[in-house]
Amino acid sequence: MRLSSFFLPTSRDDPAEAQIVSHRLMLRAGMIRQASAGIYSWLPLGFRALRNVERIVREEQDRAGCQEMLMPTIQSADLWRESGRYEGYGKEMLRIEDRHGRDMLYGPTNEEQITEIFRHYIKSYRELPKLLYHIQWKFRDEVRPRFGVMRGREFLMKDSYSFDLDYEGARRSYNKMFVAYLRTFARLGLRAIPMQADTGPIGGDLSHEFIILAGTGESEVFCHRALVEQDVLGDDVDYEADLAPEVARWTGHYAATDEKFDEAEAAALGDDLVRARGIEVGHIFYFGTKYSKAMNAAVRGPNDEEIFLEMGSYGIGVSRLVGAIVEASHDADGIVWPEAVAPFRVGLINLKAGDGDCDNACEEIYRTLERAGCATLVDDRALRAGAKFADMDLIGLPWQVIVGPRGIAGGSVELKRRDGGAREELSLESALARLTASPGAGGSATS
Ligand code: 5CA
């Protein structure tokens, strides 16, 4: 992509409305534009990052055996009357009346919708278990939308739903999602810690929030130091194996959000207690037969008996994650994208656009990188070098290749790593070889 034609409205000024750094940087880097309170348009740079986050979330759900589908944003109020949540959900629910006077709503979550689909088709215990998910926009009329996409009113969520015959099966599904979440956040370059959590309007008696530690997090959290340090399982997780020991490795240590804070347990940790602020990027729930009983979703068992489905639901804040990643990964000059989610992998700076040698070298580097699947943004604008450097640092692509007349006369370019700022003067060939050797997980040229 050439910056001369790319839609990238960066800004030098700090927006007055932004209270935290990720909100400020996302606005300044031209990633998002507020449409109304808590509702945002995603501009091309932001949308590329959002898509990369979404892709990793999807890959890890698929790997865990969860099947993707898509449910609508607008739901019928009747479904929510069946579950008993229509009144209780209160002012957070955006209620709409259609032209025929029917009550509709913009979905804040989809337990009712998926239960209705499931009960219609699935009649026998033989068809269980099933894990389904979708990635869809939600609306919650939050009292205080704030921090940009972190607490929006309209936001993108991945929500999964599990259906099992009994408690043991439901626990297996819960454990699959638990491990898939650890892997998802690790691939996004984040350390998310599972913590005991309140179930709120979703309900149920078993629930974990996945929290990343960040000074600007909305909740206060407490956990054992070991959880901040231990490794996440690698690529080769066997989701059919017993995952209980892996889950126990995480739940065996104390970790709780402020709602579940227990003075005595925390005190017992002594020096191992980490007390911090956190951002909730995922939340998983086991709620048994809460919805299946209310909505009459049952299957026939081996002896033709009626068995109500054991269910759980599992959410990831996809759009919130983009803000959370920026919150966790930035410096004084701007965003520092982890490779996996970077909107482009390389920023190529032509210091003298219009100079034949610089233009030719940039063209060659650009073509070679794109051919190798390495998404590249070329700054071919006729601006002074300082402005180009500032913009490139602000948007935070992992690598910068700087092409200037003096270097190119001797066949060399400068390679800068955004994270840490290390610079190296290399021959054109070595720079290309370096960048194409491991084209990173994200930001592929064709995405
Ligand atoms: N149905 C369940 C799980 S599928 C559910 O809705 N869970 S939730 O309420 O905890 O939301 C799931 C995730 O969505 C949260 O962990 C959070 O990361 C994200 N989320 C929730 N509210 C917002 C919001 N207002 N803005 C941005 N992300 C949000």
Image (spheres, rainbow, N blue to C red):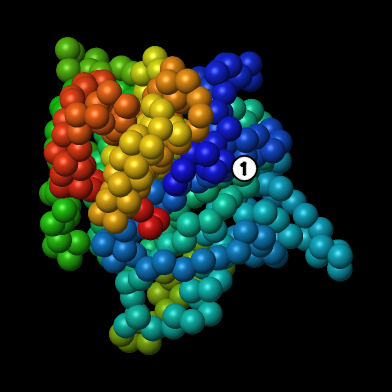
Circle 1 packing at 10 Å, graded few (<14), some (14-19), many (20+), is few
Residue named by callout 1: 41
Give the number of callouts.
1
Mark 1 lies within 8 Å of ligand 1 (Cβ measured): no
Percent across and percent down for residue 104 are 74, 60
Q: Quadrant of residue 346?
A: top left
> In this orientation, does residue 369 appear?
yes
Q: Nearer the viewer, residue 324 or 299?
A: 324
Which residue is at 48% across, 57% downward? 135
In-image side of 319 versus 60 (left or right): right
Secondary structure beneath label 1? strand
In the rendered view, tell whether residue 309 sits above or below residue 442: below
Percent across and percent down for residue 80 are 64, 59
Q: Amino acid at mark 1?
A: Ser
Which residue is at 29% across, 56% downward? 371
Which residue is at 37% across, 68% downward? 67
In-image side of 363 versus 6 (left or right): left
In the rendered view, tell whether residue 397 sits above or below residue 105: above
In the rendered view, tell whether residue 266 sits above or below residue 428: above
Percent across and percent down for residue 210 are 34, 38
Work out which quarter of the rendered image holds the C terminus and state it: bottom left
Which residue is at 38% across, 58% downward? 446
In the rendered view, tell whether residue 149 sits above or below residue 367: above
Specify the farthest residue to the top. Answer: 271
> In this orientation, does residue 181 appear?
no
